[in-house]
Image (cartoon, rainbow, N blue to C red):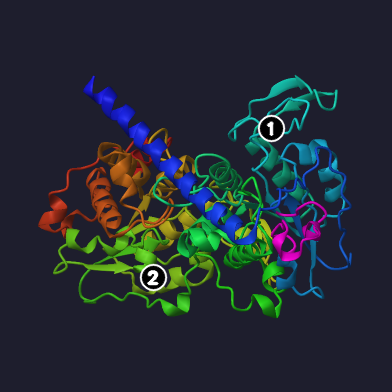
Amino acid sequence: MASHRIISMNKILKALGHAASTLVCCIAISSAASAQGALPAAVNTDPAQARPQLPEPANPALPSLVLIGDSTVRNGRDDGQGKGEEGQWGWGNPIAAYFDAGKINVVNRAIGGLSSRTYISGGHWERTLAFIKAGDVVIMQFGHNDSSAINDTSRARGTIKGVGEESQEIDNLLTGKHETVRSYGWYLRRYVAEIRARGATPVICSPIPRKIWDAEGKIGRGKGDYAGWAAEVARQERVAFIDLNEMAARKYDEMGRDAVMKLFPLVTPDERVHSNWAGAELNARLVVSGLKSLRLPLVQSAFSAKAADIAPAEDERPVVDGAKVRGDMPRDPALPNVFIVGDSTVRSGGSNGMFGWGERIAPFFDTSKVNVVNHAIGGRSSRTFLTEGRWDKVLAQMKAGDVVLIQFGHNDGGRIGDPAMKGRASGKGTGPETVEDTKPDGSKEQVHSFGWYMAKYVADAKAKGASVVLLSPVPHKDAWEQGRDFSTFAQWDAEVAAAGGAQFADLTMVVSDGYRKLGAAAVAGLFSDARTHTNDAGAQFNARSVIAALNGLPRNPAAPYLSAQGKAVPPAAATAGSAPASAAAAKAWP
């Protein structure tokens, strides 16, 4: 009974917090009304069956940046309703000034009042798709209208919540037609597929936040619904993503309530969705910041001078400038080495509080017996670590008796040739097939499979007389509670190890099992960003997990070099047998 009282009281307090937040907002509006007279009535710029005149590419010979979405991207007739800067504006209007019209068309074909579903069912997407050509970039931002009713006589624009494959058959009360309604994620995936089929690059943008504060005085985020679902589709499809929802909410929190109020029209009832010109300008700058972080070649070369002062948004998987990273050298050339090769989950250098497990593993080794040499660098894949010549530097330091720990996968996914992948994607599987990739400078590269690159590392190291352990990638913060993360990469690692005489350690599952013991709340405290990079505590946890994985191998090649701390780590049960082919890999070890 006591627990029920606590839950009820918490609900009451939370409700009071929301009520207080709303009251403060009303007071602010009332104060503005008192100072300026009665506030004007809010304007509906989203007619139920919109047929606006949409722009076409000004110069068909140029590439285009095409925008699709709702009224937060293009509001009404895109004219501020004759109210100038105090009217309603979408960010798709001011963003054009951040691009050189002599290099790129900015074509804003968003329509107010539409959802990801009705932009298609109304025929607008078909007409827009006709203008999209190879090399173009298309930004989509939907979500504000997708939560509406699926079937009614008013808008009939809602989509099924989530990103699943479920559908609902309806006789549309508004159009009189039979229709199959899909999920929000399904519609986004359709846009992505059809954009790619045209040879263009899709970019998913999460919807701008509403002007609603929570009980703690923070702008509400949409991680639990459309913003989160947009991000999930971007991850599923390996599509470039701009988290405008989070970026704008963070900016609003920094500015404070009074300043944020000035970004929206002062009307009654209170306008919480559509920004005025100042708000649209802010959102446009945030989108430019997001685009800069994506480093799409077409967009990068087309910014105008107005965009010069905008810094790139923080990149979840940054490509670290190799010129600024000092390569590790063996401390004592007379000693054997444990080489560590990988990406930013292995070495981040403390940037933005991020650390990789390779930076916290040294205490588990007796450094009087072995050198621990960390060659990992952020933003690299199995492909780019080789093509940049970094593997050659490792080989130059390697000798018989050394141990090599290799972990790739975080940057290997995605479609080869997609600029959003930053030239890092490798081919799927372990076979010998290649895919030709045309690089931004026009040169051609034959891209191999993930397994091909890993097999080369194994063969080269064994030729030097070294022992190799392939580690599956550490899991994401949101992908360990159910099932497993990186299942295909784990399988490919295991297959390569089995064929090449290396060992495979399923680090993904060793860490995941450890996370399950800690619980979600504790695991959240181990990360420095949304889902990929660990902080110092997380790096220490993962470093210990690596040692547990090594201690669980049939033969741990690093065992002779472990310190007392390393020897005390119990072997992980998940090291062998978790990945589909890991048992075979274990048997292949001589």
Pick whichever, 218 or 207, lies toward us. 218
Q: Which residue is at 71% across, 54% downward?
A: 73
Percent of width and height locating residue 311: 55, 73
User: Looking at the rendering, which quadrant does residue 104 occupy?
Assistant: bottom right
Q: Secondary structure at mark 1?
A: loop
Pick whichever, 537 or 80, lies toward us. 80
The N terminus sits in image quarter: top left
Magenta region, main secondary structure: loop
Q: Which residue is mark 1?
A: 158
In the picture, measured across the screen, residue 451 lies left or right of residue 166, that is left
User: Looking at the rendering, which quadrant does residue 436 occupy?
Assistant: bottom right
- Range drawn in magenta: 73-93
Please tell me the numbered disc located at residue 488.
none
Q: Which residue is at 79% across, 51% downward?
A: 76
Label 2 is placed on what type of residue? Val
Percent of width and height locating residue 160: 64, 30
Please tell me the numbered disc located at residue 394.
2
Which of the two labelled residues, at mark 1 and mark 2, occupies the earlier sequence position? 1
Q: Specify few, some or many for label 2: CA neighbours under 10 Å numbering under 14, 14-19, or 20 or more.
A: many
Residue 579 vs 260, above or below: the answer is: above
In the picture, measured across the screen, residue 91 lies left or right of residue 583, that is right
Percent of width and height locating residue 382: 49, 59
Q: Specify few, some or many for label 1: CA neighbours under 10 Å numbering under 14, 14-19, or 20 or more.
A: many
Q: Secondary structure at mark 2?
A: helix
